[in-house]
Image (tube, rainbow, N blue to C red):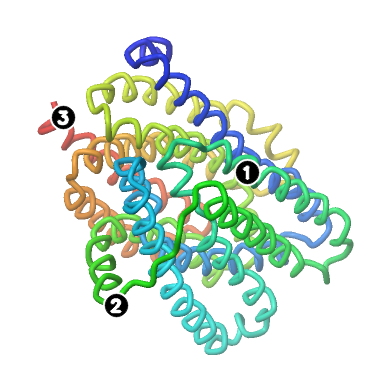
Amino acid sequence: MIKDFLNKINSKDGRSLLENFFSLGALQIINLLSPLLVLPYMIRTVGFEKYGILVLASSLITYFSSITDYSFKITATRDVAVFRDSPKKLDLIYSRVISVKSLLLIISWILIAIIVYSYQPFYEEKLVYSCSSLMLLGYVLFPEWYFQGIEKMKYITFLNVGIKLFFTICIFVLIKNPEDYWKYSLLNSLGYIGAGIIGQYILMKKYKLKFIWLKMKFVKFCLKENFPIFINQFIPNLYNNTSTFLLGILTSTQIVGVYAAIKKVIDIGITIINVSSRVIFPYLNRNKNSFDYYKKTMMVIGLVLVIIPVIFHDLIFWYLDIIDDSALRVLIILSIGLFFFMLYNVFGMNYFIVNRMDRLVMKNTILASLIGLITCFPLIHYFGLIGAALNLTICRFIMGGSLYYKYLRIGK
């Protein structure tokens, strides 16, 4: 099926798509495998409780990473893909992205400080939250949206591989006892900041991009223009990230650590789906008639990704040192949700958004996420670990299933 898909596009585009897929895929797999390599070491060295603190801090920062991104990974990528041969347009896009992201970064840091100093359990771990918040600077600086738009994902991979390897080595060298757990957040943030600085250097030296000071009215226009897709990207945090966040508030950091470890396995499948989607997104904006082949290929990939974790669950739990009685049920529930995440990604981003039906996707996302926000508390309160997994899967079922139904009605 993949061969059929590539046969439908010219050889130059085919080579470009394969290069971008493997480049971006290698990056994302490394981003996931490096934590998976150190995860058993972290769990045995600092314990599930300390690891849960790191996860809880990361879940708070995740809300603000979506805010600072402000959907530019979609809108800026789309604009760069369209105006890739216009230097003046690219300078304007670059300046707009950096200006808005910098403004939102400052606001995010202020809000994080208020939250941490207002809630005693967070304040007691203020060093972890401070180190984690530095990651936002790396997110702002790293120009993944530009490299994706010009379909040169190999630069993203080259920038990150060395830094991730350095980060992984540092974990084994610098974290030796439970008191060192905070260093994990600091090293992770420094890795992203390093990648961001080098990425900016490449944009200015190789691609000659220039920053233009924009008037506030242009910044406001950009905020307004990106708002629908931003909502579409941010709202899923109401069910996705809140499940982890609320699990830590209502139960314990140890349970959060177990949930996060299992979810990390499922996130490998999420990464594969995201990589496929992000690689094909610029191409589908130029060649909409290739969607049908992409859709069929992703259906097969989605089914395979659901089955693999369940088959190898014994090996997974042994590797991660998980002995919780609910672990297998949580893994099965999250694996099922993976298929519906695939539907949401395929039909949301790569059909409806490609065809400029942003608001349809936004409304669907808001509805499903609000349902997830409402059901999150009772499910976690009564069912704990299993409730968090159920909430995530139910919302993905609503989001992916609804868009697939809409596609069947109006897409064909």
> Residue 216: which numbered mark, if any?
2
Pointer 2 local density, CA inside 10 Å: few below 14, some 14–19, many at least 20: few
Q: CA distance from mark 2 to mark 1?
A: 38 Å
What amino acid is labelled 1 in the image?
A: Leu
Asked if residue 163 is positioned above or below residue 48 in the image, the reply reads above
- Disc 2 is placed on an element classified as helix
Q: Going 48% across and 30% down the picture, which residue do you hit?
A: 306
The mark nearer the N terminus, 2 or 3, is 2
Q: CA distance from mark 2 to mark 3?
A: 42 Å
What amino acid is labelled 3 in the image?
A: Leu
Foreground tag (1 vs 3): 1
Q: Going 57% across and 52% down the picture, which residue do you hit?
A: 205
Asked if residue 188 is positioned above or below residue 410 in the image, the reply reads below
> Residue 408: which numbered mark, if any?
3
Residue 309, located in which quarter of the rendered image? Answer: top right
Asked if residue 278 is positioned above or below residue 123 in the image, the reply reads above
- Disc 3 is placed on an element classified as helix
Residue on which the image places disc 1: 32
Q: CA distance from mark 1 to mark 3?
A: 34 Å
Circles 2, 3 touching at the beta carbon (< 8 Å): no
- Disc 1 is placed on an element classified as helix
Visible residue check, residue 400: yes
The mark nearer the N terminus, 2 or 1, is 1
* Residue 322 x, y percent position in the rendering: 70, 46
Residue 10, located in which quarter of the rendered image? Answer: top left
* Residue 282 x, y percent position in the rendering: 35, 36
